[in-house]
């Protein structure tokens, strides 16, 4: 039940991003659900490998390269899922940052520990 609620919260957060950032577009809530599912799978499977491979660059930039990785993954999902569009790389970095903040805020308000 908690997993389903988290999935819905993340989809709502992704659905809210285009209202704050014009270069990200989500056409429907169903597209947001699919995008969040794929984004979660990519973040679970591919992101740890990318973080490990880019560890020297991440240490050199004091952790700021993580934003680049998040933006690239967000952009990749935008290119992969129909109904979810990201205009470019910097839009993806901003969209990923906004998505994380909104998702964190909604999860902390709606989910109990």
Image (cartoon, rainbow, N blue to C red):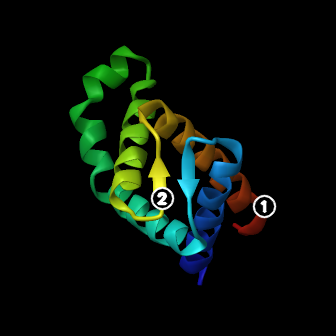
Residue 108 position, x and y percent, is 72, 58
Which residue is found at the position 59% from the left and 71% from the top?
Answer: 29
Which residue is tagged 1? Answer: 109
- Res. 39 image quadrant: bottom left
The residue nearer to you, when weighing 75 against 6, is 75
Which residue is tagged 2? Answer: 84
Which residue is found at the position 50% from the left and 69% from the top?
Answer: 31
Disc 2 secondary structure class = strand
Which residue is found at the position 55% from the left and 71% from the top?
Answer: 7
Q: Is residue 108 left or right of residue 77?
A: right
- Which callout, 1 or 2, points to the residue nearer the camera? 2
Residue 34 position, x and y percent, is 45, 71
Which residue is found at the position 54% from the left and 76% from the top?
Answer: 3
Residue 9 position, x and y percent, is 64, 67
Residue 41 position, x and y percent, is 36, 63
- The quarter of the image holding the N terminus is bottom right
The residue nearer to you, when weighing 96 against 56, is 96
CA distance for labels 1 and 2? 26 Å
- Res. 60 image quadrant: top left
Q: Is residue 15 above or below residue 96?
A: below
- Bin the neighbour count of mark 2 within 10 Å (Cα to Cα): few under 14, some 14-19, many 20 and up: many
- Residue that protrudes farthest toward the top in the picture: 60
Disc 1 secondary structure class = helix
- Residue that protrudes farthest toward the left in the picture: 53
């Amino acid at each position: 039940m908690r997993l389903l609620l988290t999935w819905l919260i993340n989809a709502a957060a992704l659905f809210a991003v285009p209202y704050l950032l014009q270069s990200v577009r989500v056409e429907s809530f169903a597209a947001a659900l699919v995008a969040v599912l794929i984004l979660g799978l990519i973040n679970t499977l591919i992101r740890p490998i990318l973080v490990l491979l880019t560890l020297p660059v991440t240490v050199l930039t004091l952790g700021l390269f993580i934003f680049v990785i998040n933006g690239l993954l967000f952009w990749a999902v935008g290119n992969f899922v129909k109904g979810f569009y990201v205009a470019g790389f910097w839009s993806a970095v901003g969209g990923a940052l906004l998505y994380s903040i909104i998702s964190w805020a909604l999860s902390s308000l709606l989910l109990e520990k």
